[in-house]
Image: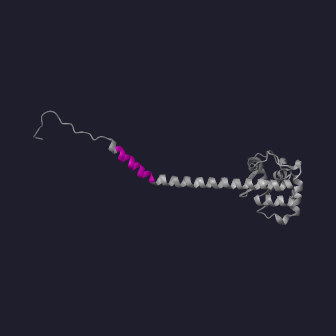
């Protein structure tokens, strides 16, 4: 690998994770972001994809609709549609990003595909951890709710023990035996 093609130290798994979006129930990256990471121009990337269409089934890559593109621009840090290259962008899943690196076949693309895969894997781990925490919290909540009555009864019993019984005061004076 030539010295001018070394990966920038700015590129990290965390930086790549910021470029992963959730579209159609899948985690994807935009074609322009992958082109930049892989060190090629977006037009070259799209050309290679068109030449190797059979390598990119729908679960690897798909093109966004106008509506999806509008949503991406409005909900993410994408300034405008022009920023996406003036066309409906292609998006790549984790598998598509790896396949893309193999058809581009540049040293930078191969190295960067490793970072991209690690970013997708890290995101999966975070989502799994989040689901596990939510599940455990739900289980704990059920246990506390089911035991709530028992806990209240226990506190009432403790309070009952803490209250001193009232002593009956002896009345002073005469007792009326006729009543």
User: Which residue is rendered at x = 78% and y = 55% of the image?
Assistant: 114
Q: How many numbered circles does the render carry?
A: 0
Query: Could you say which is closer to the camera, residue 36 or residue 87?
Result: 36
Which quadrant of the figure contains the C terminus?
top left
- Residue 174 lies in quadrant: top left
Residue 43: x percent and y percent?
89, 54
Q: Is residue 152 magenta?
A: yes
User: Which residue is rendered at x = 82% and y = 53% of the image?
Assistant: 34
| The residue stretch that appears in magenta | 147-159
Residue 28: x percent and y percent?
76, 55
Looking at the picture, the colour scheme in use is one colour
Query: Could you say which is closer to the camera, residue 119 or residue 78?
Result: 119
Lateral position of residue 54 relative to residue 147, left or right = right
Q: Residue furthest left?
A: 178
Residue 146: x percent and y percent?
46, 55
Residue 164 in view (yes/no):
yes
Magenta stretch, main secondary structure, is helix
User: Which residue is rendered at x = 21% and y = 37% of the image?
Assistant: 169
Residue 14: x percent and y percent?
73, 48
Query: Could you say which is closer to the camera, residue 5 or residue 60?
Result: 5
Residue 22 in view (yes/no):
no
Q: Residue furthest bottom?
A: 54
User: Which residue is rendered at x = 84% and y = 60% of the image?
Assistant: 102
Lateral position of residue 49 relative to residue 170, left or right = right
């Amino acid at each position: 690998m030539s010295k001018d093609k070394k990966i920038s130290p700015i590129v990290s798994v965390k930086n790549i994770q910021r470029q992963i979006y959730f579209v159609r129930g899948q985690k994807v990256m935009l074609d322009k972001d992958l082109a930049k990471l892989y060190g090629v121009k977006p037009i070259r990337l799209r050309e290679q994809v068109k030449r190797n269409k059979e390598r990119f089934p729908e679960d690897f890559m798909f093109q966004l609709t106008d509506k999806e593109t509008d949503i991406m621009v409005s909900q993410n840090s994408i300034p405008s549609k022009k920023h996406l290259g003036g066309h409906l962008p292609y998006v790549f899943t984790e598998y598509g990003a790896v396949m893309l690196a193999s058809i581009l076949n540049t040293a930078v693309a191969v190295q960067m595909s490793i970072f991209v895969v690690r970013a997708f894997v890290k995101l999966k781990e975070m989502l799994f951890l989040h689901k596990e925490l939510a599940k455990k919290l739900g289980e704990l909540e059920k246990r506390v709710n089911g035991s709530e009555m028992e806990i209240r009864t226990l506190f009432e019993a403790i309070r009952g023990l803490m209250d001193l019984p009232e002593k009956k005061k002896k009345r002073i004076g005469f007792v009326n035996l006729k009543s």
